[in-house]
Amino acid sequence: MKFKKQLADGVIYKNPVLVQLLGLCSMLAITTSISNAIGMGLAVTAVLTCSNLLISLLRKVIPEQIRIASFVVIISGFVTIVEMLIKAYLPDLNKSLGVFIPLIVVNCIILARAEAFASKNGPVASILDGITMGIGYTLALIVISAIRELLGNGTLAGVNIMGSSYKPMLIAILPAGGFIILGCLIAGMNKLLSMTGKKKKEPAHTGDTLVTEKKAKEGTENA
Amino acid sequence: MNGENKMLTVSASPHMKSWETSRVLMLDVIIAMVPALIWSVYAFGFRALSLTVISVASCVIFEFLTQKLLKRPVTVLDFSAAVTGVLIAFNLPASTPLWIPAIGAFFAIVIVKQLYGGIGKNIVNPALAARVFLFIAWPNEIKNFIAPSSEKLSAFSINVDAVATATPLASLKQGVTPDVKIFDMFLGNTPGCLGEVSALLLIIGGIYLLVRKVITWHIPVAFLGTVAVISYLFPLDKSVHAWEFMLMELLSGGLILGAIFMATDYVTSPVTKTGRIIYGVGCGLITVFIRYFGGYSEGVSFAILIMNLLVWYIDQVTRPRVFGIRKEKKKKEKEAA
């Protein structure tokens, strides 16, 4: 049950990209093709899950005052591992993602989940949180990159869909088009959430947040 | 609601009745654009007309469909969508494929106008946003500027092959003074977008709008004046007279079209007089900077879009003093002294 709730949170109600608006910079830069999006999504999911686990295990050892610095050290360790693995086994992906793999270190999603979830919950819940948030991130990336690749290049995952007479809409794979498409998707997501919220007659968030997370929220508010 | 109830409307003050509905204003704008439209048909053939018709029709249809879909009151009869349609077509060269204005209309009406709440709520001018969108999205389809009355393009085939000529603006960008007479540029005998070539007819339209009090002089004068002063003081090409270079800068590209018809859009321009002058000067400065130093040869559309985004701040800064209330700062200074 918990996993289902967490999955619904990660993919829909608290989608890291479309609802929490985290990690947008690298997202806008790499979503020009589906293969990039899948690669980036999996890399972030891997780092997120591993760092969530380690931070959750160390949460009682890490001093409160220097927790952010400790989180960053842990995260950058995992990012380095992922980067080396991609360099060794997927050189093409490494070439097309470029600098955005090392930049996962400063991706807000990972630090946000470490701070808001992993440092306050047990290891199993933290792993699940990493996986579900990673799935939500990857799905959002795939949707955005599918639209951008289809409009801007006429292809989906490298396969030509629109035919040879299609004139590609260049703006879709340029940064400006990324912003426009992201804006439209966020607007659609808001509309969707407000519609489901009305049906349930209660805000989607309050009922099904984990108790610990509620406490965490209160904690940050007090601080 | 109509008929006899109109006389008995209960509303908050001021209880003023005015003929200035959006419909009358928009009709005036359309009338003011007709001379330039006729010139474009004369100069570039009936393809200019078919582009305009497609653009206007798609704007009206998209407005109708989105308003139906979003369950809003249908306001296509206020003609604001038609004005947007004409302006989109005015910003395209005659050799543009016929499907391009339709997509521009979709972007202008659905994304820029209706998603932000419809007429009066868009933060940037829809026609300009569509122009910039189209020029970035399909640079290869919209690059062929043809000389007026050089060849008659088919009005109905979707794509046409045209012999491209450099616009005066493109030559100016490369630091070469274009080989055209200034009087020809004034009349509209130069290659360019449909509605931007004839300065004379655009100015006539602008004077009509001024006389009908649809627009005020502040924005166009501040806009054109700024461009004139800077290009007179710092001409790029030293081989011609400074005033000659200045006239070329003023008459080339979409400057006059933008200053008269697009920068003065009610929704996206400041309401105070001071604000309008600040806005016009800002448009002029950004236009010249992009023309001189930017990657694109034309800066008018970007300049107006950037200033559109600043309108809220300009209105805040230039908000007039309420009668009888002294400015807080001065009061405090006096108290301190």
Image (cartoon, helix red, strand yellow):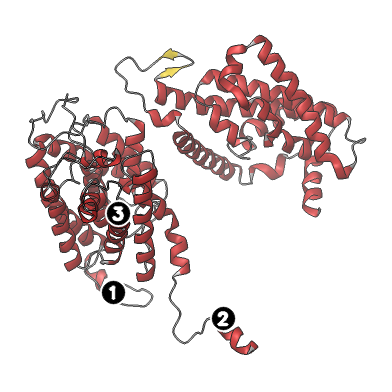
Residue A159 vertical position relative to residue A174 in the rendered view, above or below: above
Percent position (x, y) of residue B310? 44, 57
Q: Are marks 2 and 1 in contact (CB under 8 Å)?
A: no
Q: Is residue B38 left or right of residue A43?
A: left
- For badge 2, the amino acid type reads Glu
Please tell me if label 2 and label 1 are on a single chain. Answer: yes
What's the CA distance linking mark 1 and mark 3?
A: 56 Å
- For badge 3, the amino acid type reads Ser
Q: Are marks 1 and 3 in contact (CB under 8 Å)?
A: no
Q: Which of the two marks, 2 or 1, is nearer to us in this view?
A: 2
Q: Which of the two marks, 1 or 3, is nearer to us in this view?
A: 3
Judging by the rendered image, the residue that carries numbered circle 2 is B328
Q: Chain of mark 2?
A: B
Judging by the rendered image, the residue that carries numbered circle 3 is B231
Q: Which mark is residue B8?
A: 1
Q: Which residue: 69% across, 27% down?
A: A132
Q: Pointer 2: residues within 10 angstroms few (<14), some, or many (20+)? A: few
What's the CA distance linking mark 2 and mark 1?
A: 42 Å
State which quadrant residue B132 falls in. top left
Check disc 2 and report its element: helix, strand or loop.
helix
Check disc 3 and report its element: helix, strand or loop.
helix
Q: Is residue B202 left or right of residue A99?
A: left
State which quadrant residue A39 falls in. top right
What's the CA distance linking mark 2 and mark 3?
A: 41 Å
Q: Chain of mark 3?
A: B
Res A179 visible: yes
Residue A130 vertical position relative to residue B227 in the rendered view, above or below: above
For marks 2 and 3 on the same chain, the one whose residue lies earlier in the sequence: 3
Check disc 1 and report its element: helix, strand or loop.
helix
